[in-house]
Image (cartoon, rainbow, N blue to C red):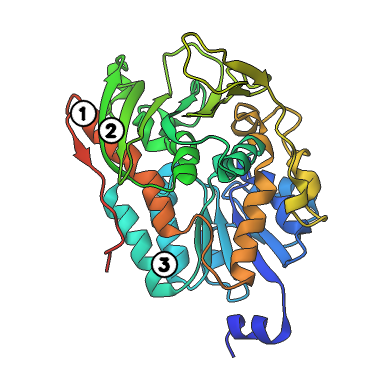
Amino acid sequence: MSREDDMKETALRLRVALVGVGFGAEFAPVYRDHPDVEWVGICDSNAEKLTAACSRFGIERRYASLEEILADDEVDAVHLVTPIPLHAQQTVAVLNAGKHCACTVPMATSFEDIEAIIRAQRESGKNYMMMETAVFTREFLMVQDRFDKGEFGEISFARGGHMQDMEGWPDYWYGLPPHHYMTHAISPVLRLLNRRVRKVHCFGSGRLPEERRQRYGNPFPVETAIFRLEDSDVAVEVTRSLFQTVRPYSESFAIYGEKLGFEWQQIEEEDPLIFSIPQPGSGRGRKILHQAVEAPDRQDLLPEEISQFTRKAVFSDGKHLSFVQGGGHSGSHPHLVHEFVRSMVENRPSSIDALTAAAWTAPGIAAHMSAMKDGETVFVPEFSDVA
């Protein structure tokens, strides 16, 4: 009897291995406390960090390498929180080893690697989930609720933005094409509108120093794109900056309809804005109201055992920039873990499965291609026909 059959027969809980205990440590106690998880093991190439994390979270299982995890038949699922250049290779390896795979964003940085992941997921029959925080933030959940009720009316325009100063981060960030790490900015809009990107025009802005262009061949610290969606009249604008742009962290989206508008807060410590029209009409200079709103915490969507983690953070001491500069990712982490775990328990695709992840990742790859061609049109592959 296989481990999967054994789980069905005896209702055993999942066994998960978490790879990377820098920012990845945010997820360790969430898996540890999830009622559908039997145990979580953690892995890091830095033995000192690994020992410290195991001690801090009371976790017994530890792994020195991903290869060690893949060889362990007791592990059902792997959550990768590793450097961007490793995502595609490691994801394919996990799926080919017959294990479910969650991976931090982006899914990949080339169309070929996206195809390889989709192919590996289909051949393995295991679940894949891209762990996109933006569509599980309390702000997005608030907007989604109002959007689904029809409160926005017909949508006219949407935009996303991700401004971040990456000085002092690991070397692989230096010279990274900005839109290769764009999913935080575009995924909320694509999820709300339920459309994929058909084509893009993009311009690079600014100029990186020569030494920072070597690794990726990218000359731009900033990229701005305008996307045309399939079967939609709505255009979507996205700007992403990594270097040489003095601006506090902002990971945001905005959406504007005929009845209601929403804008993410300009500064992370502030509240988002809702725009509304008190009395419908077509007169000149009609009044439009703005209201700062506090998005409700959606602990009601989570098991009680992990609901505290929408507010409680491992890195609340301010020592890890991924969490601090991300504004705490607005309570998204336990929602991500819960969705990944429940998708496996319920034997269904995750809500950000391989094709969804491709639809949210590929536009950024296409946008950078367009920027390198001074704004020429680039069409985005659909990937549904990957054999």
Left/right of residue 235 with respect to residue 44 in the rendered view = left
Q: Secondary structure at mark 2?
A: helix
Taking the spot 66% from the left edge, 80% from the top edge, the residue there is 7
Quarter of the picture containing the N terminus is bottom right
Separation of residues labelled 3 and 1 (CA atoms): 31 Å
Quickly name the residue at label 3: 121
Taking the spot 70% from the left edge, 33% from the top edge, the residue there is 295
Taking the spot 43% from the left edge, 73% from the top edge, the residue there is 124
Quickly name the residue at label 2: 368
**Residue at the top extreme, as displayed:** 285
Name the amino acid, label 2.
His
Q: Is residue 198 above or below residue 376?
A: below
Q: Give how far across and how far down residue 334 sits, in percent.
A: 69, 49
Q: Give how far across and how far down residue 202 sits, in percent.
A: 27, 27
- State if disc 2 and disc 1 touch (CB < 8 Å): yes
Q: Secondary structure at mark 3?
A: helix
